[in-house]
Amino acid sequence: MIQDKPVLTADSTTIPAGGSVTLTCEVKESADLKYEWFRQTSSEEKSIITDESGRTISVSEGGTYTCRAEGKIIIITESDSVTVQKTVHDKPVLTADSTTIPAGGSVTLTCDVKESADLKYEWFRQTSSEEKSIITDESGRTISVSEGGTYTCRAEGKIIIITESDSVTVQKTVHDKPVLTADSTTIPAGGSVTLTCDVKESADLKYEWFRQTSSEVKSIITDESGRTISVSEGGTYTCRAEGKIIIITESDSVTVQKTGEFEHFT
């Protein structure tokens, strides 16, 4: 005799890493029944879980499950399926073909996982001024990005969820030069002038300062990282700025002379 299908339910459709979920096979009949349980994955044929005969089971592997029941005088047909996903902590390995995006260009990010299942990928980006957000229109294993940021990825298949990768930060090079100004182009004897490096970006930036004279190669003033500096030596000065996710190219130069000096600066 064939009766109505069992009703198969899961207490969760996501198996936590190292855990399990409980499946229950409900039938209307109260007769003494044995239950058969089946599991199928995208890479395997449906197979019977032969050592389970009760109406509830705990499962720790992702898959598409069904059940059926049989008694001495009754056979209850196979249930509709329930799919559960397994969460695994084998993080994807996220790599970038470069950590610096050239002005007007892009870099390629790749999200590598051990699993060979058919997967969709989610991509996330965070900046110093924004919360982490998902790049919703990208689902492939590789993406090209043209904006600086801290990126992560995760993967998900029909029966598996692969947790989020470690992050990779890429910087974007922009050609909006800083505007370098001096409060005076002449340094008084025993005094100094103040140089200011203005940029459009509001991100947290560090500044590099350079000085060149006709007798010296351009050198970086290594102990200065702020937006303004005081200088007491004549020379031709430039600046550039860099943040966690942005590189701002070098400014045009400003030349200041020290009173009493007649050196020609280049």
Image (cartoon, rainbow, N blue to C red):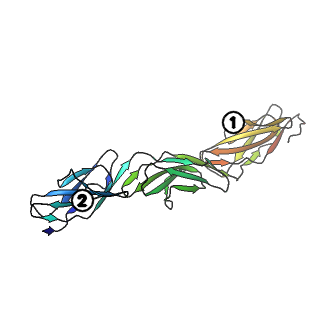
Q: Describe the element under mark 1 as helix, strand or loop.
A: loop
* Outermost residue toward the right in this view: 262
Q: How many marks can you see?
A: 2
Q: Which residue sits at x=24%, y=59%?
A: 9
Residue in the foreground of this view, choosing between 97 and 145: 97
Specify whether 165 is left or right of 43.
right
Residue 128 in view: no
Residue 211 coordinates in the image, percent (x, y)? 78, 38
Q: Describe the element under mark 2 as helix, strand or loop.
A: strand
Sequence order check, earlier mark of 1 and 2: 2
Specify whether 128 is left or right of 71.
right
Residue 100 coordinates in the image, percent (x, y)? 63, 48
Which quadrant holds the C terminus?
Answer: top right
Residue that badge 1 annotates: 224
Q: Is residue 24 above or below residue 168?
A: below
* Outermost residue toward the top in this view: 190
Which quadrant holds the N terminus?
Answer: bottom left
Residue in the foreground of this view, choosing between 228 and 139: 139
Residue 207 sits in quarter? top right
Specify whether 141 is left or right of 264.
left
Q: Is residue 206 above or below residue 161?
A: above
Residue 149 in view: yes
Residue in the foreground of this view, choosing between 77 and 163: 77
Query: For the residue marked with disc 2, what is the amino acid?
Result: Thr
Residue 232 coordinates in the image, percent (x, y)? 78, 34
Residue 245 coordinates in the image, percent (x, y)? 60, 48
Q: Pointer 2: residues within 10 angstroms few (<14), some, or many (20+)?
A: some
Q: CA distance from mark 1 to mark 2?
A: 65 Å
Q: Pointer 1: residues within 10 angstroms few (<14), some, or many (20+)?
A: some
Query: For the residue marked with disc 1, what is the amino acid?
Result: Glu
Residue that badge 2 annotates: 9
Specify whether 217 is left or right of 19.
right
